[in-house]
Amino acid sequence: MSYPLTVKIRTVLKLFTEPKIISALISQRIDGLLFDEGWFESFKTLKPIDKDGNPIPWTTYSFIDFIKPRLNKDLKVFEYGSGNSTLFFAARVSNVISCEHNKVWIDELKNYIPANCKVLPADENDYEKAIDKAAGKYDIIFVDAVKRNECIRESLQYLEEDGVLILDDSERPEYKPGKDFLKNEGFKQIDFYGIAPGILFKKCTTVFYRHPNRLGI
C-alpha cells in the first residue's frame, strides 16, 4: 500500500518519540521472526525466499511451516501459477506440473526448473482448462493464479480422492464461490493466516481436505 509523503513524514517523526518501537524494529533485522523467516531477503529481491536464499511459495509463513514436513517423494502436484513455489515443491515431491499464461515468465523458468517439473503454456481466456492437457490425477492442487474460482471447479475431477486443494489469498471475498463449492463437495478447511515473504499485511492460505487425505490431517 502506498501512502502520501506527508503521512510517511508524520510516521517517521512519531517513531522518534517511540524509541522502544524503533529498537524492536531494528532487532528484527538482526534476530527475530522476520530475520528467521528471511522476510528481509524476500523484500529486497522481490522474490519469495528463505533466509538462506532457497525458494519458497508466496503464501503465509504459517502455511509453509505446516506443509513442509508433510511433503514427500510419493506426491504429485499440479499448480495454477508457476514460480518459486514450483521450485519449492519440486525439491520435495516426485513430480510438479504448472501452468502459466505469461510467455516471458515461461521462458525464464525453463532456465532453472529441475527435471521433475514441467510448465505448460496456458491461455488466460480458458486458463482453468490447462489441467485438462496434463493427463492424470494429483495429490495436491495449488491454486494461485487467475480465474481461481473456475480453476477450483475444473480441477476437482483431477484431484485424487485423498488429495488436497490449496487456495492462496483465500481471504479475498471474490474467491467465496470457489470456497463454497468445495464445502458443498464435502471438503473441510484449515485457514493459515499471517504475513508472507516480503509483505506485512495479513493474508490467508487455505488447505481444503477430506478424510482420509495424503497429508495426514
Image (cartoon, rainbow, N blue to C red):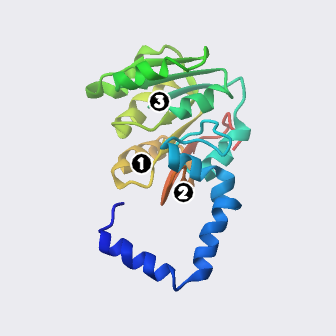
Q: Confirm or deny contact between disc 1 and disc 3 (CB under 8 A).
A: no
Q: Which mark is residue 3?
A: none
Look at the image and tell me whether residue 161 can be seen. no
Which quadrant, please, contains the N terminus?
Answer: bottom left
Q: On the image, numbered disc 1 is attached to which residue?
A: 180
- Between 80 and 197, the residue placed more toward the observer is 197
Q: On the image, numbered disc 2 is attached to which residue?
A: 195
Work out whether mark 1 precedes mark 2 in sequence or the reverse, and give the earlier one.
1
User: Dot 2: few (<14), some (14–19), or many (≥20) neighbours within 10 Å?
Assistant: some
As helix, strand or loop, the secondary structure at mark 3 comes to: loop
Asked which quadrant contains residue 20, the reply is bottom right
Q: Residue furthest left?
A: 125
Identify which residue is drawn at 55% across, 83% down.
18
As helix, strand or loop, the secondary structure at mark 2 comes to: strand
User: Dot 1: few (<14), some (14–19), or many (≥20) neighbours within 10 Å?
Assistant: few
Q: Answer left or right for 75 relative to 199.
A: right
Q: Label 3 amino acid?
A: Ser
Q: Label 1 amino acid?
A: Asp
Work out whether mark 3 precedes mark 2 in sequence or the reverse, and give the earlier one.
3
Question: In the image, which is nearer the foreground, mark 1 or mark 3?
Answer: 3
Q: On the image, numbered disc 3 is attached to which residue?
A: 82
- Between 68 and 149, the residue placed more toward the observer is 68
